[in-house]
Image (cartoon, rainbow, N blue to C red):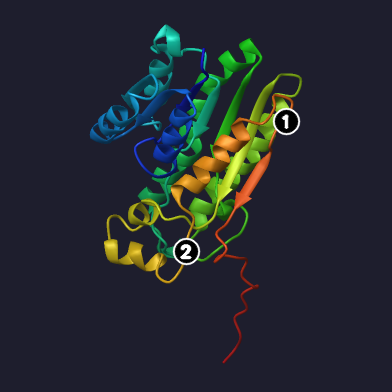
Amino acid sequence: MSQIALITGATSGFGAACAHRFATEGWRLILCGRRQERLDELCTELAATTPVHAFPLDIRNEVAVNAAIAALPVEFTDIDLLVNNAGLALGLEPTQRCNMQDWQDMIDTNIKGLLYCTRAVLPGMVERNCGHIVNIGSVAGNYPYPGGNVYGGTKAFVKQFSLNLRADLLGTQVRVTNVEPGMAETEFSLVRFKGDDHKANRIYEGVQPLEAADIADVVYWAATRPAHVNINRVEVMPVCQAFSPFAISRDA
């Protein structure tokens, strides 16, 4: 029987691209996201290709996450791959001017939601002694930038949690990978700027950023290495992006 992938935040961006890529390769899919209409559209697109089980889910709700995993149909219970994709950035203000609710939403989604999903799925993988957790981190977890404050902090958590999770799983056949994208043109900036198309579009002016399919390709590659191979981290940037020099503020 074909393998099963659970993808969070499947209604757009990296999540939707991963759903399409794994469906093309014959994987059975469990898809969740907060937008029912988007889920319905995605299921309609993919149902002719592979079995799909989809349900609306806010991963910030621990009770809802546990209930959804417990209620999976028997043919979808043995999850081979969890793609912890759901996440977001909000705002680009310096720390002293940031919106506290934005901080809380990023922490609740990028950290707590990822933990809830991992904790719900992982015991089954350990019991079966097979499985793979792929976390979608960010280069923001490695390199600081103005306005990245809490978002970068949440992705640094994802990086370190992935490494610690791998240490906890030593002696099992369960694998852990952190995929760390750089600039990518998805709904990321539109969400960050709360629907302001002008601000979001300016981010990508004059550059060729990564596409969602590029990251889906990396996730699929990591997930399909031989069973004895664990890809710890993959950092991916478009050619147009690199590391900035140290910033120095000089007296006038």
Q: What residue would you read off at disc 1?
A: 229
Q: What residue would you read off at disc 2?
A: 208
Q: Secondary structure at mark 2?
A: loop
Identify the residue shown where x is 54% and y is 66%: 240
Q: Nearer the viewer, residue 237 or 159?
A: 237
Q: What amino acid does circle 1 point to?
A: Val
Q: Position of residue 58 (x, y in %)?
A: 35, 31
Q: What amino acid does circle 2 point to?
A: Gln
Residue 197: quarter of image = bottom left
Q: Is residue 196 above or below residue 30?
A: below
Q: Is residue 36 above or below residue 4?
A: below
Q: Residue furthest top?
A: 74
Q: Residues within 10 Å of mark 2 (few under 14, many from 20)?
A: some
Q: Position of residue 91 (x, y in %)?
A: 39, 58
Q: Is residue 45 left or right of residue 185?
A: left
- How many numbered marks have been drawn onto this rendered protein structure? 2
